[in-house]
Amino acid sequence: MVLNIIKLSFGSFLFLFIVACVNKPKSKDNIVSNKKILKDCRYYAYDAQQIVSNLGCYNCHVRTNERLFEIPTFSEISIIDSLKLITYAFTKKHKGWYDKSGTFKKSRMDTLSDCEIRSAIRYIKDYNRDTPPMSSH
Amino acid sequence: MHISDNGSGELTLYGDFTITLKVLDLTTNGAPNLNSLMTFTQQVITSKLRGGGYKSGVIYFEYNSSTKSFNFRKNHTYSIRYNFNCGVNVIQINMLSQLKGNDFVLAVVDSIGHQFTDQYGKKHNSGGLAQRDGGPAVVSYNEWRKNKYIGVHEFFHTLGLGDIEDLSKKDRLMYHLGDNTSYNISDNERGDMMSFLMRNISDMTKGTYSYTNLNFNTLDLLRRFLKDTTNGFKYNKAKFR
């Protein structure tokens, strides 16, 4: 009886140990990998502007005070919280057009890396911030 | 202003328009070379905006070429060619009352104290400063004399372009670290400027359209820009009253 209990406990321990060993390194790798991406992600305003420009955000979110129909201006979207902006851009307000199954699923928005998305979001956010003026040497 | 659809996802926008850049001399002792600098600036802006611009993958409303209108319920991905015939006037103004609405302005000052640090950690003095997307541009007269392209560089910030610091792009006009090998503008940048100038493509279907916006107060923006002590502008304040 005691031997059976010991065997059962050992079996359970062995099973949990294997599961833990299989899963733990994988998630650790992901964390390390994500941290590395974020660490390597440097912000270059010009490149970020090119991302935003190439996506064509300005065509509908115009850079004037007056809205194109009821579409928020570029200035208006720049005051949205960063996390909300990501949701806003990819799913909700764009009606899922840029989702994997959306109308524009092949558009460059779906192919952007995490770093490019972060840069684009920062560029949009900077639009309403009191950032230093553009300068020339 | 006209739009032409080739039926294969490419829209060509064409027509004539004129850009006027107003130059305001705020230097203490005057700027004897101002006319030649303005002429040079006008020629360069004209040549850089010539030849159109190009943007691909532009998602916009679907264009109906038979009704010459956009269907605001349907979207379409286009390549857009900007083939405008763009006239450029760079003129000097002497009174602030000559600045109205969303006029483009380039103010000339004695010097600029503002410094910036590039992405490599190196500090630079500023020969010019501008607020992007329609805002005022300011150049130091002495620096402008040393580098005649600064006026164009700053004005292109006004037209929405950003600075380039990538050392492999020293041949670009928007490279701003001072050791340019040339002053080129890419088709994409040209497209960006045209896109900024057009603002809303659908307005082109309204026939004659004026891009004058009297609600935009350039003069007030310039006043605040000059007064901002972080920019370190030195100029004859008596000329700005």
Image (tube, helix red, strand yellow):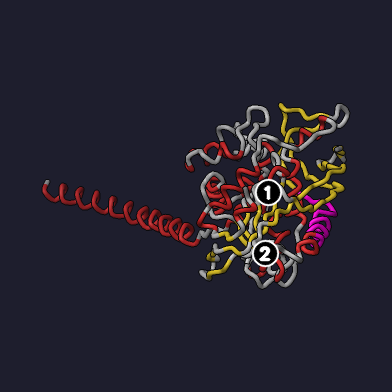
The residue type indicated by label 1 comes to Asn
Q: Nearer the viewer, residue A36 or A43?
A: A43
Give the quadrant of the N terminus of chain B: top right
* Residue B186 in magenta stretch: no
* Residue B46 in magenta stretch: yes
Closer to viewer: mark 1 or mark 2: 2
Pointer 1 and pointer 2: residues touching (CB < 8 Å)?
A: no
- Examine the rendered structure and indicate whether residue B16 appears above or below residue B141: above
* Mark 1 Cα shell of 10 Å, populated few (<14), some (14-19), many (≥20): some
Q: Residue at x 80, y 54 (%)?
A: B49
The residue type indicated by label 2 comes to Asn
Q: Nearer the viewer, residue B106 or A79?
A: B106
Q: Residue beneath label 2, please?
A: B29
* Chain of the residue where label 2 is placed in the rendered structure: B
Q: Nearer the viewer, residue B224 or B52?
A: B224
Q: Position of residue A137 (x, y in %)?
A: 62, 67
Q: Position of residue A27 (x, y in %)?
A: 39, 53
Q: Residue beneath label 1, please?
A: A54
Which of the 4 image quadrants contains residue B116?
Answer: bottom right
Dot 1: element: helix
* Mark 2 Cα shell of 10 Å, populated few (<14), some (14-19), many (≥20): few
* Chain of the residue where label 1 is placed in the rendered structure: A
Q: Residue at x 87, y 39 (%)?
A: B4
Q: Mainly helix, strand or loop, the magenta region?
A: helix
Residue span colored magenta = B39-55
Q: Residue at x 57, y 59 (%)?
A: B233
Left/right of residue A106 with respect to residue B64 in the rendered view: left
Left/right of residue B234 with respect to residue A40 in the rendered view: right
Query: Marks 1 and 2: same chain?
Result: no
